Image (spheres, rainbow, N blue to C red):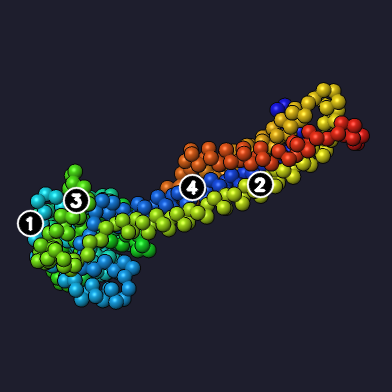
Amino acid sequence: MSEALGTLARNPLRASLAGLAMAVAVATTAVVQTGLDGLARSARQASARAFGSDSFVVAKVAAGNLSRRALAGKLERNANITRSDVRFLDKVAAGRVVYAATAQRSADISAGGRTFEDATVNGTEWTMPGIRDIGIDRGRFFTRDEDVSGAQVVVVGRSVVDALFPDRDPISQSVRVAGKGFRVVGMQVAQGTAGGQSLDRYVWMPLRAFERIFGAPASLQVFATGPGDVVVTDAEAQARVSMRARRHLGPAAEDTFDIITPEASRTFVTRITEQIGAAGPPISLMALIAAMVVVTNTTLVSVTERTREIGVRRAVGARRGNVIVETLAESLLVALVGGAVGLLFAVVTLSAASGSIDVDLSLQWPVALASLAAAGLSGALSGWYPARRAASLDIVDALKQE
């Protein structure tokens, strides 16, 4: 080890360049892997916020990947879901399902001379936070009494808050939706996006208030889940049986409604993140191979310059194994020191990126250790050929070298 350190100390520029190549490779590996993991985690969280993690939706039609003919057939066969349907579902829920009827449309929101255009206004019921992660940052969601009375209160998303109340607390402030005054009772945390749609543009209000200003929707969507210890699949089965009873469907009749589970969305997100993640290993491998070429070349140059020195050591009793270990130690030290520098660079880069895109990109220990281990393995592989070449030098020929 001391001989390897001495060799590196005598050639600091060459060792630094080889270490820099390995640092870039390790930083690339750590940044790419952490970035892909962070984006995948953020996508899964956004999907859970948008669709719920243990919930489902009863709707007139779930478009999905239907053909035009199949979609047209469903639109013709499936009946609208009305408030009376929701009341029936609540009546026969028997404590096994929690429902929240929901309607949605776009509208401008204004306050104090400022306007937020095309906000996504959701009319829903007070049970929604127990079904889907609304993410209240300040204030609260509307209460059961406010829901029943159709109180003109709203919970607003972060983008709406930033646009309408950039320099003051939005709680208890007044906003106007479709010309009607509402009081802000809650503010959401930043939700991100799901399916390309921003979740921070949302405005939530009691469904009765929604119907007063926009009119009754043609068809409702009904979010649902199983309360307490009820498994969501059991709740889904209960909802299906209830809807079929409501529609008086016989055993052989097709459903005249759709039940949408978040599984399809989660599967889609998983598939996309897996496809993106598949690019990580090739990128990291290419960076490591490039670094290995540099380290191998540097170690070969070192062996060539020290040919006479190696011959002298062999002549005075050094074994081939000693030469191999010394050469491997040289390339391994370059790789590990370069890897450590690369990890420090990755931490700084990921920290800056995390603050700018609002995604947790902190470097995890497993990724750091794996990156450093990859650097060590690359260093050992890079030094193997130069080490074998150094050990195989003919002593007499080596002593003739100047």
- Going from N to C along the chain, the mark reached first, 1 or 2, is 1
Q: At x 21% / y 47%, what residue is drawn?
A: 231
Q: Nearer the viewer, residue 72 or 138?
A: 72
Q: Which label number is shown at residue 291? A: 2
Which residue has dot 3 on it?
A: 234
Looking at the image, can residue 129 be seen?
A: no
Which residue has dot 4 on it?
A: 34
Q: Which label number is shown at residue 159? A: none
Q: CA–CA distance between discs 4 and 3?
A: 37 Å
Q: Nearer the viewer, mark 3 or mark 2?
A: 3
Q: At x 9% / y 51%, what residue is drawn?
A: 94
- Going from N to C along the chain, the mark reached first, 2 or 4, is 4
- Please report contact status of discs 1 and 3: CB closer than 8 Å, yes or no: no
- Going from N to C along the chain, the mark reached first, 4 or 3, is 4
Q: Nearer the viewer, residue 158 or 325?
A: 325
Which residue has dot 1 on it?
A: 91
Looking at the image, can residue 401 be seen?
A: yes
Q: Nearer the viewer, residue 187 or 238?
A: 238
Q: CA–CA distance between discs 1 and 3?
A: 17 Å
- Please report contact status of discs 4 and 3: CB closer than 8 Å, yes or no: no
Q: CA–CA distance between discs 3 and 2?
A: 55 Å
| Image quarter in which the N terminus is found | top right
Q: CA–CA distance between discs 1 and 2?
A: 68 Å
Residue 77 image position (x, y, % from top left)? 19, 73
Residue 27 image position (x, y, % from top left)? 57, 46
Q: At x 31% / y 56%, what residue is drawn?
A: 263
Q: CA–CA distance between discs 2 and 4?
A: 20 Å
